[in-house]
């Protein structure tokens, strides 16, 4: 059975394979150009000799994603995809339009091990990691389908990127290469729930992306109630890693804070958060929490969010409220896959 994923091979390894098979080195560039153009069948690589096409097809696979479902927001044009992977698993991805261009939110795993209680992805547990090629294929497929060019990427879809460290870093390096889907690291954000060893590894990679930390609470007591990861790496340890990250990279960190009504959204919580973030080069992004079927959580009122924001501003903390995109299509990740799963199991679809 052919199993080697050609998209995840570097130009050098592919070049070596070609050499061993008596082919000139320029074939590597030709193959790469076809892959970058989104071709998923070796037989369509018409500038390669026929026997080489057949050998490639026997030796390698070109992992791709296909569109299983697609929802387009009537409000703002946000597109949410449910992609099918080659083994039948599914992941979500969202395409959003901003003034500066199109941004895509990608999944890095099927499911997630981290079990955050407010998150739809966490509910079904972990299934598997995505390969670098499967992350790339999400962009290629969305670009082709929507007829747009994606100019920025956020790793905020399904899964915990730092729990799939090697594949994510390989994907980031592929994105940085000229040709094909080429996106500079300054247009990439990676969001983590706080996998501390991953933050230390990432700071040594010299990848100038924007690191986002899903903080969501001002103290360990509240954070551990919704985020089990906090019991392993509590806030102090996490913030120490963040300070070192900022020092090593010179880059500001973004803290995500989901506003949950009556849980983490009081003025006192804002004061406590400000105390913790004092002196940290950062930006706080307040996110009205999204409702998830089967969970009691509700988003804080607009007024509550404004007041929380005022406290942080008064304390000199840079803060914004995240714009809600795709409100009519439930654009936060994890929901569509769950709906599809439940329908497949013959249960009633979620509202
Ligand atoms: N695993 C990573 C990235 C994927 S989750 C992480 O946790 O950071 C992307 C973001 O969505 C995180 O900030 C996460 O906390 C947030 N999120 C998850 N469920 C949410 C919900 N129901 N409402 C609002 N934000 C949510
Ligand atoms: Fe995983 Fe992130 Fe969801 Fe937590 S919020 S369960 S880390 S995807």
Image (cartoon, rainbow, N blue to C red):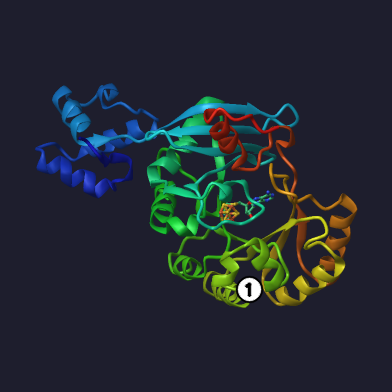
Using the rendered view, name the quadrant where residue 234 is placed. bottom right
Instruction: Indicate if the residue with disc 1 has its beta carbon within 8 Å of ligand 1.
Output: no
- Establish if 317 lies above or below 10: below
- Establish if 254 lies above or below 349: below
Q: Is residue 164 visible?
A: yes
Residue occupying the point 75% across, 45% down: 323
x and y percentages locating residue 192 in the rendered image: 56, 59
> Which residue occupies the foreground of this view, 275 or 34?
275
- Judged left or right of residue 217, residue 205 is left
Residue occupying the point 86% across, 51% down: 301
- Judged left or right of residue 55, residue 176 is right
Residue occupying the point 73% across, 70% down: 218
Q: Name the residue under label 1.
A: 235
Q: Can residue 155 be seen in this view?
A: no
- Judged left or right of residue 173, residue 20 is left
x and y percentages locating residue 59 in the rendered image: 19, 36
Say which element carries label 1: helix
């Amino acid at each position: 059975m052919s199993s080697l994923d050609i998209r995840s091979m570097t130009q050098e390894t592919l070049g070596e394979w070609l050499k061993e098979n008596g082919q000139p080195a320029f074939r590597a560039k030709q193959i790469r150009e076809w892959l970058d153009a989104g071709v998923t069948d070796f037989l369509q690589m018409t500038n390669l000799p026929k026997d080489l096409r057949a050998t490639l097809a026997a030796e390698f696979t070109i992992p791709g994603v296909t569109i299983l479902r697609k929802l387009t927001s009537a409000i703002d044009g946000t597109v949410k995809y449910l992609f099918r992977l080659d083994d039948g698993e599914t992941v979500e991805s969202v395409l959003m339009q901003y003034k500066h261009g199109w941004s895509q939110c990608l999944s890095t795993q099927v499911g997630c091990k981290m079990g955050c209680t407010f998150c739809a992805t966490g509910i079904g547990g972990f299934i598997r990691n995505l390969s670098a090629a499967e992350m790339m294929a999400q962009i290629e497929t969305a670009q082709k389908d929507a007829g747009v060019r994606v100019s920025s990427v956020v790793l905020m879809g399904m899964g915990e990127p730092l729990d799939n460290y090697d594949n994510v870093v390989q994907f980031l390096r592929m994105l940085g290469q000229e040709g094909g889907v080429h996106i500079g690291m300054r247009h990439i954000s990676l969001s983590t729930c706080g996998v501390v060893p991953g933050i230390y590894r990432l700071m040594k990679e010299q990848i100038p992306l924007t690191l986002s930390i899903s903080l969501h609470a001002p103290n360990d007591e509240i954070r551990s109630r919704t985020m089990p990861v906090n019991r392993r790496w509590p806030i102090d340890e996490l913030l120490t890693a963040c300070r070192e990250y900022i020092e090593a990279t010179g880059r500001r960190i973004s803290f995500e804070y989901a506003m949950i009504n009556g849980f983490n959204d009081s003025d006192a919580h804002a004061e406590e958060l400000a105390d913790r973030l004092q002196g940290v080069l950062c930006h706080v992004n307040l996110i009205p929490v999204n409702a998830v079927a089967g969970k009691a959580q509700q988003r804080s009122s607009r007024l509550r969010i404004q007041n929380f924001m005022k406290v942080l501003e008064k304390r000199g903390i840079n803060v914004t409220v995240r714009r809600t995109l795709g409100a009519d299509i439930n654009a936060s990740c994890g929901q569509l896959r769950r709906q599809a799963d439940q329908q497949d199991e013959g249960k009633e679809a979620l509202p």
